[in-house]
Amino acid sequence: MKEIRLNGSRMLGKAEMHSYLKRKLDLPEYYGNNLDALWDCLSTDSLPRKVIICNTGMLLDNMGPYGEKLIKLFVDAAEENSCIKVEIKA
């Protein structure tokens, strides 16, 4: 299982966050740079991955409610797709 660390301190705005996620998660070129597109990619991904989201306090400070939605999306994607495991760290 591939382990991917996402650093919440690197997510400073929506555009930067989606660019960072696209690179770190190796999302397809057609990735739509929004939470719906991220859900589509994660919920259908068949590659086993463990995603560790670190510095969530900074993520929430930087992104506010959008950061909360992002974290919830990862948790929900892990419940929907058995190939995805998610660990949230402060």
Image (cartoon, helix red, strand yellow):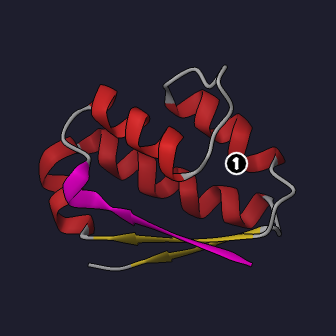
Which residue is label 1 attached to? 42
The 10 Å Cα crowd at callout 1, few under 14, some 14 to 19, many 20 or more, is many
* Image side of residue 81 versus residue 11, left or right: right
Quadrant showing the N terminus: bottom right
Counting the numbered discs, the total is: 1
Looking at the picture, which amino acid does disc 1 mark? Answer: Leu
Q: Is residue 43 above or below residue 46?
A: above
- Dominant SS type (magenta): strand
- Image x and y of residue 60, in percent: 21, 55
Using the image, determine if residue 23 lies above or below residue 55.
above
Quadrant of the drawing holding the C terminus: bottom left
Residue sitting at x 34%, y 51%: 68
Q: What residue span does the magenta drawing correspond to?
A: 1-10
Q: Which quadrant of the view contains residue 64? A: top left
Where does the image place residue 38, in percent across and percent down from the top left?
A: 60, 37
Q: Is residue 62 above or below residue 85?
A: above
